[in-house]
Amino acid sequence: MIHAAAKGVAYDCFVEPEAKIPFMAMPDAVRALIDIAAAPREALSSCVYNIGAFSLSAGEIAERVKRVFPGARTGYAPDAVRAKIVASWPEDVDDERARADWGWQPAYTWDRTLDEYLVPALTRG
């Protein structure tokens, strides 16, 4: 959706506007790996952790993308197979153990991800 908007082409989302899943900016994902590797072993209560940042619906993404790219043309053409896969994923992840054990905190919100990470990368000429 974001890539299409940056290119000025229409995009039909393969899920309904209400479909919601968790997201994370790549810099946060990389930092999480570095941080957990650097954490003292005695501070870790597990060897597997969920980490989260933000969860969005397709409609929320479309709404925000249209603020950045006012000409964005986004529609919805749900694909039953792909939508079923997305519906099977959690809408959010519980990362409380990572926050408690090694101080996980995402640095990127959805707005920051779009404004500082994705849009600049997509609009470089």
Image: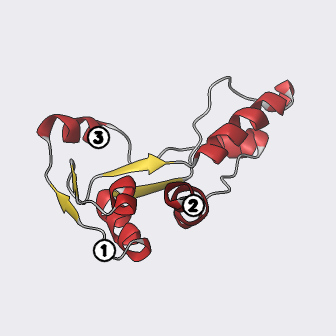
Position of residue 121 measured from the top left corner of the image (x, y, whole percent)? 55, 54
Q: Amino acid at mark 1?
A: Gly
Marks 1/3: CA–CA distance: 27 Å
Q: Secondary structure at mark 1?
A: loop
Disc 1: CA contacts within 10 A as few (<14), some (14-19) or many (>=20): some
Q: Position of residue 81 (x, y in %)?
A: 16, 34
Precedes in sequence: disc 2 or disc 1: 1
Quadrant of the frame with the N terminus: bottom left
Identified at 59% across, 44% down, the residue is 26
Depth check, front residue: 99 or 1: 1
The label shown at residue 71 is 1
Q: Circle 2 sits on which residue?
A: 120
Looking at the picture, does residue 118 appear above or below residue 95? below
Q: Quadrant of residue 11?
A: bottom left
Residue lying furthest front: 125
Q: Nearer the viewer, residue 4 or 37?
A: 4
User: Residue 61: where, in percent of width, then height?
Assistant: 37, 62
Taking 38 as reference, is 31 left or right?
left
Count of marks overlaid on the render: 3
- Residues tagged 1 and 3 counted as in contact (Cβ below 8 A): no
Q: What separation in Å lies between label 2 and label 1 (alpha carbons)? A: 17 Å
List the residue tagged with mark 3: 86
**Residue at screen point 29% across, 40% down:** 86
Residue 27 numbered tag: none
Relative to 58, residue 51 above or below: above
Q: Amino acid at mark 2?
A: Pro
Mark 1 or mark 3: whose residue is earlier in sequence: 1
The x, y position of residue 99, in whole percent, is: 70, 46
Q: Residues within 10 Å of mark 2 (few under 14, many from 20)?
A: few
